Amino acid sequence: MTEYDIDVAVIGAGPAGLAAAVSAKENGAKKVTVIDRNNWLGGILSQCIHDGFGVEETGSSMTGPEYANMYIEMAKKQDVSFLDETMVLGFDKNRLITAVNKNGNHKIKAKSIVLAMGCREKTRWNIMIPGNRPSGIFTAGVAQAFINLYNIIPGKNIVILGSGDVGLIMARRLKFEGANVLGVVEILPYASGLPRNVVQCLDDYDIPLFLNHTVTFIEGKDRLESVTIAKVDKNRNVINGSEKKIKCDTLLLSLGLIPENELSNNVGIKIHEVTGGPVVNQFLETTIPSVFACGNCLQVYDTVDVLSIDAKIAGKNAAEKTISKKKKSIKTIPGKNVRYVVPQIVDQPGKTHISLRVEKPGESTKLHVISDGNEIFSKKLPWINPANMVEFNVDIQDIVLDKGHDLEVYLDG
Amino acid sequence: MKNFHVGIIGGGVVGSAIAWELSKYDISVAVFEKGSDVASGTSKANSGVIHSGINSATGSLKAKFCVEGNKMFPSIANQLGFSIKWVGKYVIAKNQGEVKELERLKKIGEDNGTPNLNIVDGAKVNEPNVSCHSALWVPTAAIALPYEFNIALAENAVINNVKFLLENNVTNLKKTNDGFLIKTNKGEYQSKILINSTGLNCRNIVSMLEEPDFQVYPCRGEYLVLDKKYGSLVKSMIYPVPDKELGVLGVHITPTIEGNLLFGPSAEFIIDENDKKTTKEMMKTLLVEAKDIVAKIPENAVINAYSGVRCKLASAEEGGWADYRIEESKQTPGLINLLGIESPGLTAAPAIAKYVTKMVSKRVELDKKNDFKTVKVFGKRFNEMTSAQQAYLIKKDKRWGRIVCRCEHITEAEIIKALSNPLGAKTLSSVKYRCRAGMGRCQGGFCTQHIIRIMEKQFKLDPKDINLKSPASYLFTSRTREVKK
């Protein structure tokens, strides 16, 4: 058993964990350790060999590994320490972490913890696609790992279900490798990935996008032989008679991401029903004091740039061990056309960074933040899309907290 | 060697149990299995219940072998090292009208020799999430992982020199003067005695030698698997009163050894026995029927669905119930047929194996081996060990310290052990069924790539040759352009 005392333990060495660790160091934490399962740093970025990373943050476009490397260099310069190939088995409310690696068991006592475990992909069973269980069905991220990390191609004739960003990127990637990408099937009336990816990954390569469609059946005794796709109505119910069989050997699933919070659940951190991540206050502190959350285990981000900026907030607060003084705790409540708001709790006055996702796409809308009938913030938004996170800063005055009314956040127009 | 005393067709749970039983004797035995691993048909896709014997007509072979088999499980599980939990089961009556059915089952059970049956008032049912009028408590019903039991039997048989010929599909059979000529896609073999333990294929095998005097009516059962998070909704198995019209037990809730819950099976007579699909309609029905028993079951916590197909000798019109037929063919001496082995086949397997061994002994002399060994196949998992045990193993072998499957905390050492199985089964599913990697809530999202990497680097398998489960279920088609050259 190896035991250590450290200031900040970061769980996960993906982009969120790296940014949080760098930020913790910059803000005065002495001993910062990042723990990760893999034998590499950078998490999922290592398989994202396309470019476009870092544009918003740095102004230059990088590939995933390049972007990760930028943070790895910073972390090394800052003397962040790493425990790689190490699995965190759990931690308790006093922030004692138990972990295991090839050198044995580890107990790590941290003054604060930053959760940065990332997310996992939804599977066939999250949407219960009936049929047979042949080989040839992969989640898009797994297929991406095989192609980009191991040079292995999963199939030749590909159907992609779900137009999330990973699915769109994989459509193009497989096309580059000479596969027939027969189409991307999306149940919604609009793509769920970023609009730029629809153009750059599908339109530019003449890959069809079947909106208002879903896969209703999977056929194949040994290897996948076909999928049946069908049109859906506006309530997402299959329209009988619209079924069409597509012969293919591979189905990639890009159905969305689920924040990884097994560790958070086990210690009793409150998880938000909609985000799937921990409920946090404006310091990104979870319902267990001095345990912070960031990155895709907090909420699923659309770009790594924004994710890193938020993760730095978590890292900074972990370093300063900003335990909220709980002046008065108010909630943020998602109103009209708002799916969720992060943070869910505000308990200190001052500049507060808020992010949200909308329910439906729209144009020329206005965002409102209301406290007890008074608008404390508003912002015009030329267009909104569920795929694009909305972010803004609100200065929350003492009086808003004193009154104790929850903040309603909604969109109109 | 291509000549065997006994050839067994089928590496399901019954074929493997017979193989293990025969491996105690000084004879040569071969098992012909068309799949890439044992337990590749109905034996892996069922409820995993060790039945008590309350459901089969008194005097039937089903009842006899079920009750006998049930009694053998504590000792076999201990010898072969697979998990079993004696969680018991409740058959619940929703109303006064169904109580008669409980009494009927209790009577059958008692006549069959099932011990300690008890009808209790609904209020005394020790399941806070189940409400019912009253229930029959069956303490001798247990749960096991059906594939674990099957694998443990087969691997122990191999250790005692039974030859398992995987991916050997029997294509032709001929009766010779002193036995049988067995032709498979891989070669030709001979045996003195031939045991047809092929489940749904039993009629096809018989018809290679003689005109069958029976029909097989495949009856599909679909299941749903619920996330472990909700595994504590019930402690024991909860059954409705059985559906007499279809000769099946009805949709029940079964806890699994691993802490998930199973809902199912449905019962649907089908034409093609290979049609192992799941359907939208049945998925909905299963959830509705499960919620009818435990209202608290969430709608969106299913992590997997599968189906298995029962081998029935009676059609739906005939009521779906027929007894097992385990007999030596009159027309083809030396051919031992096991026909219509469906539920409670898992429970009955060890008793059937004893019975068949006796039949074999009439034709071949059976002398006990001196060097018969038993090996506990499934050791304690890393995630079940104390940290001292973990530390000890990691010190001995670093691979115990590398966790590959993050949902189930399965280590590289466990993956390698699974891939080193004595059967030589090397599919992705072989790994999954031996060590549970890939069975958690991410369903292989993280570990698949690492397992493939281990297969490639440490077992020198070409990714193009790696299959999911069966010989034609390839996972990959090629290398990327850069590597092809």
Image (cartoon, coloured by chain):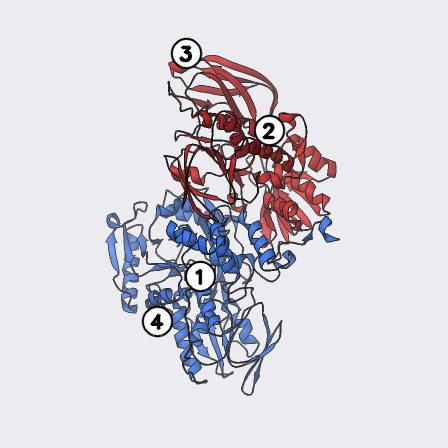
Mark 2 burial class by Cα count in 10 Å: few <14, some 14-19, many 20+: many
Please name which of the two marks, 2 or 1, marks the residue nearer to the observer.
Answer: 2
- State if disc 1 and disc 2 touch (CB < 8 Å): no
Q: Chain of mark 3?
A: A
Mark pair 3, 2: CA separation: 33 Å
Give me the chain that's red: A
Q: Which mark is residue B148?
A: 1
Tell me where residue B2 appears, x and y as whole percent: 57, 79
Mark 3 burial class by Cα count in 10 Å: few <14, some 14-19, many 20+: few
Q: Is residue A126 left or right of residue A108?
A: right
Residue located beneath label 4 in the image: B64
Q: Which mark is residue A399?
A: 3
Q: Are marks 4 and 2 on the same chain?
A: no
**Kind of residue at badge 3:** Ile
Mark pair 3, 4: CA separation: 79 Å
**Kind of residue at badge 2:** Asp
Residue located beneath label 2 in the image: A305
Mark 1 burial class by Cα count in 10 Å: few <14, some 14-19, many 20+: many
In this view, which residue lies farthest toward the right? B485
**Kind of residue at badge 4:** Lys
Location of residue A326 with respect to B402 vertically, above or below: above
**Kind of residue at badge 1:** Glu
Mark pair 1, 3: CA separation: 64 Å
Q: Are marks 4 and 1 on the same chain?
A: yes
Residue at (49, 56) in percent of width and height: B413
Please name which of the two marks, 3 or 2, marks the residue nearer to the observer.
Answer: 2
| Comes first in the chain, label 4 or label 1 | 4
Q: Are marks 3 and 4 on the same chain?
A: no
Tell me where residue A29 appears, x and y as whole percent: 47, 28
In this view, which residue lies farthest toward the bottom? B177
Asked whether B100 or A223 is in front, the reply is: A223
